[in-house]
């Protein structure tokens, strides 16, 4: 399938598919110290390895009988009390900064495991015993790529994210929304869907992913949030998978518009938006990213300094990406990059150049620059 690439006005073929299995990259000492400084590294009562000790599991199917890739786990009674108590306390750490005074009426309703994908997460369902209201969070292996992705999302996107690490364990809050693939099937063509506003948000989402080089944003890796507004609805597309932060070598894998799973969003955007509107929304998103970058310039600099020295992708992918980005943006600025961290830093400068000049001018005599 072919469609128009609105960033340069030419027709473009779909790029290569993402790597089927991305390796896990360990959290080095510098990144660990950064996480401690930012309050992300905490002592957790239960770890990822503890949860692997389930005795059996049963597949979870949706209401139509289709496989969801999730399995409901069961644990030996000798381990269950310890695991249940620890998981409730982790929920309190996520939601109330470790205030355990509210946990007596909370319980673990279910622990699900997913063997599909890179992170093999556990999904924890916490239930309020008074009213049966429930919430979820996730426990995964602490992968450096994913941590960089979560931090960049927290700093540069309009969304704040709560997550914690403890040695090789990563705990993430649940991000609410309708999975993109489900939205396409069930709500894309609903009469109440405002396609112009939805298309505008997809253009902005596409731009956010490209500017910070977050890859593999196929429809099942993001969710659509819907907020009632004056006489209509507003939409927010949020990433829920950060494993492919600056890993792949193909430039197109950092642009959600090129994935076949997202073609309904692309076709909708081309049908309801003209070229001038698309360029306007891209410019709006780059402006907002620049404001966030300036506000958190010390934090982003510290993170990128660590990322530059870290290895989160093979050399051949680094070389491929810097070549493709240089050709795409008609610059040799990427030639001296030897790591994905350097590419991300250079890419932020190149894509936000005009905006950064205005911000740096307004910063005046500030000693430390945004990047």
Image (spheres, rainbow, N blue to C red):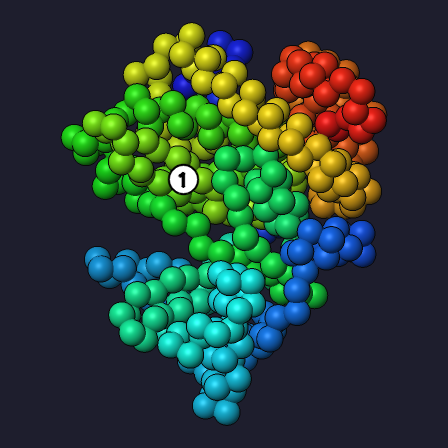
Q: Nearer the viewer, residue 176 or 21?
A: 176
In the displayed structure, would residue 36 be above or below residue 261? below
Horizontal side of residue 90 vs 136, given as left or right: right
Q: Quadrant of the N terminus?
A: top left
Above or below, 158 against 57 in this view is above
Label 1 crowd (10 A; few <14 / some 14-19 / many >=20): many
On-image quarter of the C terminus: top right
Quarter location, residue 314: top right
Question: Is residue 212 visible in the rendered structure shown here?
Answer: yes
Residue 168 against residue 58 in the figure, above or below: above
Instruction: Tell me where residue 311 appears, x and y as whole percent.
Output: 77, 45
Residue 149: in sight, yes or no? no
Q: Tell me which residue sits at (70%, 65%) in the image.
A: 167
Whole-percent x, y for residue 101 in the image: 48, 74
Horizontal side of 234 relative to 97 (left or right) equals left
Give the camera-side residue of 101 and 127. 101
Q: Residue at x 39, y 35 (%)?
A: 236
Instruction: Name the residue carrying label 1.
Output: 219
Q: Nearer the viewer, residue 111 or 338?
A: 111
């Amino acid at each position: 399938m072919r469609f128009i690439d609105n960033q340069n006005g030419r027709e473009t073929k779909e790029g290569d598919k993402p790597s089927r299995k991305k390796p896990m990259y360990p959290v080095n000492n510098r990144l660990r110290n950064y996480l401690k400084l930012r309050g992300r590294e905490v002592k957790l009562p239960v770890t990822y390895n503890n949860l692997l000790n389930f005795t059996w599991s049963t597949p979870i199917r949706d209401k139509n009988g289709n496989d969801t890739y999730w399995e409901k786990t069961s644990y030996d009674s000798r381990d269950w009390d310890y695991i249940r108590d620890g998981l409730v306390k982790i929920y309190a750490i996520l939601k109330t900064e470790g205030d355990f005074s509210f946990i007596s009426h909370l319980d673990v309703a279910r622990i699900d495991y997913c063997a599909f994908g890179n992170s093999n997460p556990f999904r924890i369902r916490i239930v309020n015993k008074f009213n049966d209201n429930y919430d979820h969070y996730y426990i995964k292996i602490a992968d450096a790529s994913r941590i960089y992705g979560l931090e960049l999302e927290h700093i540069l996107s309009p969304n704040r994210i709560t997550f914690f690490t403890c040695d090789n364990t990563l705990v993430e809050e649940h991000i609410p929304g309708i999975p993109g693939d489900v939205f396409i099937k069930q709500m894309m063509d609903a009469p109440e869907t405002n396609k112009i506003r939805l298309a505008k948000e997809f253009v902005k989402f596409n731009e956010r992913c490209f500017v910070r080089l977050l890859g593999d944003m196929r429809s099942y890796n993001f969710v659509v949030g819907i907020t009632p507004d004056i006489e209509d609805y507003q939409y927010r597309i949020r990433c829920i998978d950060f494993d492919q932060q600056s890993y792949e070598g193909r430039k197109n894998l950092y642009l959600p518009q090129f994935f076949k799973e997202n073609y309904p969003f692309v076709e909708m955007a081309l049908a309801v938006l003209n070229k001038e509107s698309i360029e306007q929304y891209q410019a709006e998103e780059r402006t907002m990213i620049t404001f966030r970058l300036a506000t958190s310039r010390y934090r982003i600099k510290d993170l990128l300094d660590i990322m530059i020295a870290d290895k989160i992708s093979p050399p051949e992918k680094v070389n491929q990406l810097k070549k493709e980005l240089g050709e795409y943006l008609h610059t040799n600025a990427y030639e001296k990059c030897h790591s994905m961290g350097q590419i991300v830093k250079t890419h932020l400068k190149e894509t936000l150049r005009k905006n950064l000049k205005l911000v740096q001018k307004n910063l005046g005599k500030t000693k430390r620059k945004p990047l």
